[in-house]
Image: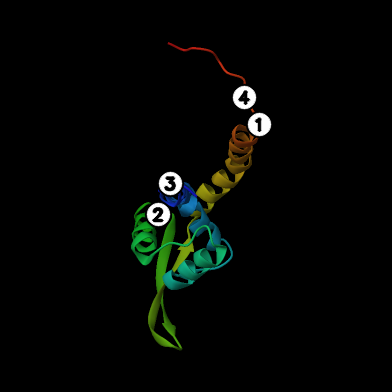
């Protein structure tokens, strides 16, 4: 591996994560409300989507401001009360739309990455 290659790889992964993280978080709430640390653990378990509290909590605040999630406080048997996040109808609609467009997007990107494309010639 050449020097700086791991930095380039990390940058590419960060850009991909930034683009899909919102929808992955919404998808984690599809079946039931979740609290922040629970979301962080689920993202970490995926490997590629591991992120920090400094990323997830501002994202959750934005989702709430955008009326894609609602919050409730619930008592916890193992500590202080937890803030749970649940999809709103708008959040479910946003997730449904992403779910609809994702396969075409993924296929298009895979096509560019796996298929040689002929040169379009000198564009200058």
Which circle, 1 or 2, is nearer the viewer? Answer: 1
Instruction: Give the mark nearest the N terminus, 1 or 2.
Output: 2
* Numbered mark located on residue 30 in the image: none
Percent position of residue 50, x then y: 47, 62
| Label 1: element kind | loop
Instruction: Give the mark nearest the N terminus, 3 or 2.
Output: 3
Q: CA distance from mark 1 to mark 2?
A: 40 Å
Instruction: Give the mark nearest the N terminus, 3 or 1.
Output: 3
Identify residue for label 3: 8
For disc 2, the neighbor class at 10 Å (few under 14, some 14 to 19, many from 20) is some
Relative side of 29 to 53, left or right:
right
Q: Is residue 77 in sight in this rendering?
A: yes
- Of the 4 image quadrants, the one containing the C terminus is top left
Q: Are marks 1 and 2 in contact (CB under 8 Å)?
A: no
Identify residue for label 1: 115
Which circle, 3 or 1, is nearer the viewer? Answer: 3
Q: CA distance from mark 3 to mark 4?
A: 23 Å
Identify residue for label 4: 117
Q: CA distance from mark 3 to mark 1?
A: 22 Å
Q: Are marks 4 and 1 in contact (CB under 8 Å)?
A: yes
Q: Are marks 3 and 1 in contact (CB under 8 Å)?
A: no
For disc 4, the neighbor class at 10 Å (few under 14, some 14 to 19, many from 20) is few
Which circle, 4 or 2, is nearer the viewer? Answer: 4
Q: CA distance from mark 4 to mark 2?
A: 42 Å
| Label 4: element kind | loop
Instruction: Give the mark nearest the N terminus, 3 or 4.
Output: 3
Percent position of residue 25, x then y: 49, 59
Percent position of residue 29, x then y: 53, 63
Identify residue for label 2: 67
């Amino acid at each position: 591996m050449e020097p700086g290659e791991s930095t380039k790889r990390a940058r590419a992964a960060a850009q991909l994560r930034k683009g899909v993280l919102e929808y992955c978080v919404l998808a984690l709430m599809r079946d039931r409300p979740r609290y922040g640390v629970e979301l962080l653990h689920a993202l970490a378990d995926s490997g590629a989507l591991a992120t920090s509290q400094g990323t997830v909590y501002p994202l959750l605040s934005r989702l709430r401001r955008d009326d894609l999630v609602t919050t409730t406080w619930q008592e916890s048997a193992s500590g202080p009360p937890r803030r749970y996040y649940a999809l709103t109808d708008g959040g479910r609609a946003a997730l449904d739309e992403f779910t609809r467009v994702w396969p075409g997007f993924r296929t298009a990107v895979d096509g560019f990455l796996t298929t040689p494309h002929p040169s379009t010639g000198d564009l200058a």
